[in-house]
Every structure is written in structure tokens, then in C-alpha cells.
Amino acid sequence: MVATTTYTIGDLAKEFDLTTRAMRFYEDMGLLQPERSGPGGRNRIYSARDRTRLKLTLRAKRLGLSLSEAKELIDMYDSPRDTGPQLKKFLAILALHRKQLEEQMADLQANLEEVRAHEKEARALLSRTEKSRQAA
């Protein structure tokens, strides 16, 4: 008999620096599907598959994907079908997020330029104010 690695909610929460509340939220979203044990099924038992799905979910979040996008992609990889459509979908989502990030970066660059212009103007005004004080 092969021993299967399992995890408690606390194990995974600690490993991934999450709260147990976040873990339950991911379960509610369908990203995790732990087995239940104990009285009334109160204890969650996570499998290696759940651990991998959690890791992929957190990676997707870092990339800027929504949890529903993450779930859609992760569920695609769970199916035994051809990976071509999965990879195409992943690339489409990444392209969309890259475009959004590039637009945000352009907005930030414009804001930085405006801040620099205001700083330059304020320094010039301060310099003139200090010179007129010294002259008086």
C-alpha cells in the first residue's frame, strides 16, 4: 500500500503564508476540494493535488489573474485533453494582463513626469523666494 501525503488546513496555510479563512475562501471558489473527516465532516484533509492547485492559484494571483480566471485555467489542466487549447487560453489571458500592466505603467510614467515637473517648478519658486529674502 502506497502512503499518500495529506495536509491539514493549518499545514497549507502555514506553508503558503495564508490564513485559514483564505483557504476556506479558495475552497468556496472551487479551487480546492479537500476530503472531509471527523464529526460532521469538520476536518479538511488536503491532497497533493490540492496543494498543487493552491500553488498554481497563488502564482496566477501574482500574475494578476482573477480567481475565476485561475480556476478556469487550473481546471483545464486537470482534464486529460490535449494541452494545445489550454496553452492558447493561457497565452490569451497573459496577453490581456500584459496589455493592462503596460497601460498602467504608461499611466504611472505620465504621473511621474508630472510630479517631476511640479518638483522642478516648486524648487525654482523656493530658490527665488530665498534669494529675495537674502536681498532684503
Image (spheres, helix red, strand yellow):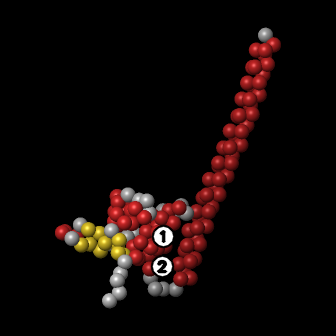
| Quadrant in which the C terminus is drawn | top right
Residue 62 sits above or below residue 2 on the image: above
Figure disc tally: 2
List x then y, in percent, for residue 74.
46, 74
Taking the image as drawn, is residue 33 in sight?
Answer: no
Mark 1 Cα-neighbour bin, 10 Å: few <14, some 14–19, many ≥20: some
Callout 2 secondary element: helix
Q: Who's the residue at 68% across and 48% down the image?
A: 109
Q: Which mark is residue 122?
A: none
**Residue under label 2:** 77
Taking the image as drawn, is residue 120 in sight?
Answer: yes
Tag 2: amino acid: Tyr
Quadrant of the image occupied by residue 78 = bottom left
Tag 1: amino acid: Leu
* Circles 2, 1 touching at the beta carbon (< 8 Å): yes
Find the residue positioned furthest to the top. Answer: 136
Q: Earlier in the sequence, mark 2 or mark 1?
A: 1
| Quadrant in which the N terminus is drawn | bottom left
Q: Which mark is residue 56?
A: 1
Callout 1 secondary element: helix
Which of discs 2 and 1 lies nearer the camera? The answer is 1
